[in-house]
Image (spheres, rainbow, N blue to C red):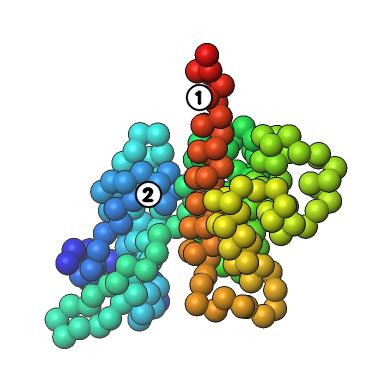
């Protein structure tokens, strides 16, 4: 437990009190740097909610952020459970250079979807991940496999996967599409799967695509 002094904002009493926090933030939500930020001040907004102000100790950020605690009253002292920290700047996912090169829009759409997920917008995030998968597959077929651009653009994603992908990529990309479709349709077919499973399958698709591109590059560079 960590003792923190606070002031009640919902009362005319401006005395200093203290409560025991179950945990302290170990990362700045603004710059995503892992650290032990400096406690500045805490205010109790009502009987159940405490908000505390912390200062990031990274010289590149040095910004203030708020942590929200849920308060439980005790016999001798009140305790606070850390709920979240904000404002949040989601950490961007970095992909291999070959993925950045063949499908920069996939990278952008995926990271926008991750930001929605980090903000709790799970229904929107799922649809975004599904869209990112389509850009990845079609850009891969057009840019790397050199398939006809007009044909690939006009095909449904499922037909692109079945008709043009190698078996390893096909198996995972097809299942990623199934889960992605669940995120866009009224009825879910795969009720025991969620966004986490969708992201795993997208990661596997990325792995196979990246491996195929790297394999070709080394074969081309080291051909006799």
Under tag 1, what secondary structure?
helix
**Image quadrant of residue 86?**
bottom left
Depth check: give the residue in front, 197 or 34: 197
Q: Position of residue 6 (x, y in %)?
A: 28, 66
User: In the rendered image of this protein, does residue 69 appear above or below residue 135?
Assistant: below
Image position, residue 19 (x, y; %): 22, 71
**If you read the primary sequence from the N terminus, does the residue marked by circle 2 or circle 1 appear first?**
2
Label 1: how many Cα within 10 Å (few below 14, some 14–19, many 20+): few
Residue 128 against residue 93 in the figure, above or below: below
Q: Work out which residue is located at the far bottom of the displayed protein and give it.
A: 75
Whether residue 180 is situated above or below residue 133 in the rendered picture: below
The residue lying toward the viewer, choosing from 190 and 170, is 170
Mark 2 and mark 1 residues within 8 Å of each other at the beta carbon: no
In the rendered image, is residue 18 in sight? Answer: no
Q: Residue at x 70, y 48 (%)?
A: 164
The answer, for residue 65, to whether it is visible in the render is yes
Residue denoted by label 2: 28
Q: Is residue 62 left or right of residue 131?
A: left
Q: Residues within 10 Å of mark 2 (few under 14, many from 20)?
A: many
Q: Nearer the viewer, residue 150 or 186?
A: 150
**As drawn, is 53 to the left or to the right of 115?**
left
Q: Residue at x 50, y 38 (%)?
A: 211
Q: Position of residue 7 (x, y in %)?
A: 31, 68
Q: Which residue is mark 1?
A: 218
Residue 113, position as x, y percentages in the image = 59, 56
Secondary structure found at label 2: loop
Q: Tell me what residue is drawn at x 51 percent, y 72 percent.
A: 193
């Amino acid at each position: 437990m960590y003792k923190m002094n606070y002031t009640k904002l919902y009362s005319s009493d401006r005395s200093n009190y203290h409560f025991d926090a179950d945990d302290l933030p170990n990362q700045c939500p603004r710059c995503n740097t892992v650290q032990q930020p400096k406690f500045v001040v805490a205010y109790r907004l009502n009987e159940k909610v405490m908000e505390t102000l912390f200062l990031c100790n990274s010289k590149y950020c040095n910004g203030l952020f708020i942590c929200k605690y849920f308060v439980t009253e005790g016999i001798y002292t009140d305790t606070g459970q850390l709920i979240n920290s904000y404002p949040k700047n989601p950490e961007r996912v970095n992909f291999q250079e070959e993925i950045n090169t063949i499908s920069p829009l996939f990278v952008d759409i995926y990271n926008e979807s991750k930001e929605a997920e980090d903000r709790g917008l799970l229904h929107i995030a799922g649809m975004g991940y599904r869209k990112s998968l389509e850009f990845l597959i079609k850009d891969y077929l057009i840019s790397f496999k050199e398939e006809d651009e007009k044909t690939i653009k006009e095909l449904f994603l499922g037909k692109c996967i079945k008709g043009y992908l190698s078996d390893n990529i096909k198996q995972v990309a097809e299942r990623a599409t199934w889960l992605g479709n669940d995120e866009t349709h009224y009825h879910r077919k795969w009720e025991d799967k969620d966004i986490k499973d969708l992201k795993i399958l997208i990661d596997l698709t990325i792995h196979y695509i990246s491996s195929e591109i790297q394999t070709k590059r080394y074969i081309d560079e080291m051909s006799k």
